[in-house]
Amino acid sequence: MIFENATLITVDAERRIIRDGAIAVSGSRIVGIGKKRDIRAEFASDRERVDLQGMLVIPGLVNTHVHLTQALIRGCADDLGLIDFLVKRVWVLMGNYDHDDARLSAELCILEMLKAGTTAFVESMLVLHYGFDGIARAVESAGIRAALSKTVMDLPSYIEGHPMHPGMVEDPEAAFQEALDMHAKWDGAAGGRIQVWFGPRTPGGCSPELYRQMMAAARERDMGVTMHLAEVQEDVRYIRQQYGMRPVEFVESVGMVGPRVLLAHTVWLDEQDIQRLAETGTHVTHNPISNSKLASGIAPVPALLAAGVNVSLGTDAGTCNNTYDLIHDMRWASALHKVNHLDPTIVPCETVLEMATINGAKAMGLEDEIGSLEVGKRADFVALDMDKPHLVPAPDPVSALVFAANGSDVDTVVIDGQIVVRQRQVLTMDEERILGQARERAERLYHRVGGGYGPRWPVL
């Protein structure tokens, strides 16, 4: 199959942009990339062709911090501080989920991500009552690539004086065993598209002993680990009071650093924290809209990048971002640091695109497979329709993508050489069913839990 007549942003080692370009795909791999005339000359004339006239093709976007199960409760906790956000709204609703609620939320989230150009993601926390099997099957059938992280915990809360909703508290042994069982069952499934990771709770939800036990199991099985760290100032104070350490000093003390560890948020770090992340090869996922909306603070992304830390990009959840559109987060990731540093040159659009593609692939341990358009890599790519008023003219396609495009501009999505979205229609999912059931299940969930989730203004 040849995808042709597009402008290609390769994000390869030379960062080439190819106008009037084409990509040849055989099976799940890219076998040719270059000018259309050269690709047509090299590959058989009877090969099926897909015309992407006027479109911009980029590597599939990699969203490295996602909460699948919060799509169903999108907008339930707007304009609240973090404690009220979690204790009074999010934990209460999610504690009342059943397996069908969780799977449907995952389907809704995946549907949205696919239509916005995300081809791979890291889910950060799946608890026992969500039903890991159902969510993994949703990933498998949708055709997307994912790392699904199973929650482990042995303490009832990580917010002092505010225990979790009982439905969110897990038996430590059962949670840990499920992580191992799901890794044995699902890691490498769906043609290698599914990974299974550990997703421990933040310090205060796990003891140092559990972290060490988890890291020993992760190293034995080559499992990834992702955890929220230093998202808010209270996290830093807790770690200092309980352990007398800085955030990164603490995770290093329990062995939770290195190339298979992805830390989310990392807003409140000092220079020593940043240096240790760089020296240990630990990855970071930046969540600019979530951090801004919850007033958590602004992560030191320019300092992290300057130190050589691999920084990727995440949307976080439907409750604290309200969308899973990573293109939206790309624009925010650049603008936020420009105004914070009063420097319009800092975190340019090219850097942000790297964060959302090749850096995300590296955070997932997949930089040799995805994240750029290169011969031999998996055929994961996205085509955006550039024939729209807000995208014309576009002398610099990277600038147009980051500063002007939206997820709704995505026309075609290819994963493992299979077209999963074409002309904005998701071919692997029943969109009408998912949207209808999501409305019904959300309404039943809010009714089951109680009122207080609607508009603050009067409704007539």
Image (cartoon, grey):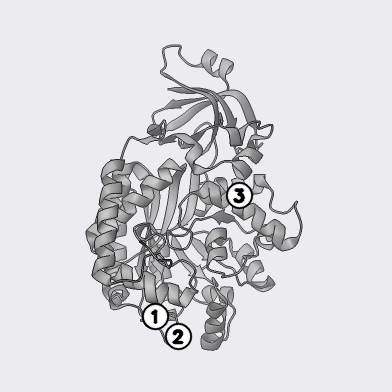
Q: Which residue is mark 2?
A: 160
Q: Are the residues tagged 1 and 3 within 8 Å (C-beta)?
A: no
Rounded to the nearest angstrom, the CA distance separating label 1 from label 3 is 34 Å
Rounded to the nearest angstrom, the CA distance separating label 1 from label 2 is 7 Å
Q: Nearer the viewer, residue 229 or 454?
A: 454
Crowdedness near tag 3: few (<14), some (14–19) or many (≥20) residues, C-alpha within 10 Å: many
Res. 331 mark: 3
* Relative to 433, 149 lies left or right: right
SS of the residue under disc 3: helix
Residue 199 position (above or below residue 110): below
Whole-percent x, y for residue 415 in the image: 41, 37
Q: Residue at x 56, y 83 (%)?
A: 237
Q: Nearer the viewer, residue 372 or 70?
A: 70
Quadrant holding the N terminus: top left
Whole-percent x, y for residue 232 in the image: 55, 74
* Relative to 452, 208 lies left or right: right
Mark 2 or mark 3: name the one nearer the start of the chain.
Answer: 2
Q: Say which of marks 1 and 3 sits in front.
A: 3
Q: Nearer the viewer, residue 156 or 110?
A: 110
Residue 339 position (above or below residue 453): above
Res 150 → quadrant: bottom left
SS of the residue under disc 1: loop
Q: Which residue is mark 1?
A: 157
Q: As drawn, which residue projects farthest toward the front?
A: 460
